[in-house]
Amino acid sequence: MCTDAMLLTEVEPSLRPLTPATYRVVARRVETDDVVTLSLEAISGSNLQFRPGQFNMLTAFGVGEVAISISSAPGAPGPIEHTVRNVGAVTNALCNAAVGSVVGVRGPFGTDWGVDDLDDSDVVIVAGGIGLAPLRGAISYLVDKPGRTGKVFVLVGAREPDQITFPDDLERWERDGAIVKITVDVADAGWKGAIGVVTTLLPTVDFDPARTVALVCGPEIMMRFTVRGLADLGVAYGSIRVSLERNMQCGVGWCGHCQLGPLLICRDGPVFAYSESLERLISERER
Ligand SMILES: Cc1cc2nc3c(=O)[nH]c(=O)nc-3n(C[C@H](O)[C@H](O)[C@H](O)COP(=O)(O)OP(=O)(O)OC[C@H]3O[C@@H](n4cnc5c(N)ncnc54)[C@H](O)[C@@H]3O)c2cc1C
Ligand code: FES
């Protein structure tokens, strides 16, 4: 006899992009008061393969499904990680998923940061708030890749010191050769670092604009000002990559929910090379 469950497991994953695979939560790490990282292991078969910058659709069963970037590094042993900010019903259920519970995973979807071909480039990574999560795997990949000649700069902005995510990674990347700088909008009594928006860090680092590629992720307004700051320092628009977010449903270019002008963010993005036409599309939404 052939049951529905058998049919689902027997179909090749790429042929059923709307059917989530089941993953178990094997660890849960609280990053800040509203951000949690979930470590997930496939219940049957091996974990999915992905490129840094891609996202999965995660299901909290009985609640709903949302797009969440993969925050671990590609090829890293062990579970895959997703870092979730609690902003609504589904992300609340995911942030509260207990170790041992089961979530759905569809993906990976979308474009990636394209870090494979940056061996000779200086890479300037600019993250605002939880925007560090989609960049985390790319940073680890670049820092750990043997034989790279370009430098890696990691510039992070957070609202307050207790909103800084991945402090252990930031220390580790610096130990392993990256130039790491952090700034906060509002300091507390113990904060000894920089104060101000993340763009204020750009002129403090010494990169060669002609051989620089920038990877930028955060709120759209922060990305626009960061692009402007990078361009003022001589980095070409085409060398700046940004990750965009829109409300998603299918994740595979079928439903149109994530449309931005002629683009579908799930299919053509979320990572885009910056351009004047992309800037116009983003600016129109902000007006
Ligand atoms: C490609 C991609 C990658 C993402 N990666 C991450 C990630 O790594 N970590 C993470 O925490 N979140 C990420 N998000 C955002 C996440 O999908 C939304 O926060 C989530 O859909 C909110 O769902 P909810 O049911 O919890 O809240 P809802 O009740 O649906 O929304 C709560 C609030 O968030 C706003 N919102 C909903 N969806 C989005 C969205 N896609 N973009 C911006 N605002 C939104 C709503 O307008 C509302 O104000 C990503 C989104 C995309 C498209
Ligand atoms: S989410 Fe359906 S087309 Fe992008």
Image (spheres, rainbow, N blue to C red):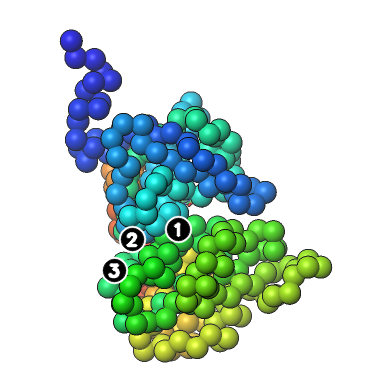
Task: Check residue 112 in the rendering and tell me which mark sits there, or answer none.
Answer: 2
Residue shown at 39% from the left, 38% from the top: 41
Mark 1 vs 3, N-terminal side: 3
Quadrant where the image shows the N terminus? top left
Disc 1, disc 2: CB below 8 Å?
no
Residue shown at 45% from the left, 54% from the top: 71
* Residue ID for mark 3: 116
- In the rendered view, does 147 fall on the left or right side of 207? left
- In the rendered view, does 204 fall on the left or right side of 234? right
Quadrant where the image shows the C terminus? bottom right
* Residue farthest toward the right in the current orientation of the protein: 189
Q: Position of residue 284 (x, y in %)?
A: 47, 65
Q: Is mark 1 within 8 Å of ligand 1?
A: yes
Q: Residues within 10 Å of mark 3 (few under 14, many from 20)?
A: few
Which kind of residue does numbered mark 1 sit on?
Answer: Pro
Judge whether 10 appears above or below 239 on screen. above
Task: Check residue 86 in the rendering and tell me which mark sits there, or answer none.
Answer: none
Q: Position of residue 79 (x, y in %)?
A: 41, 45
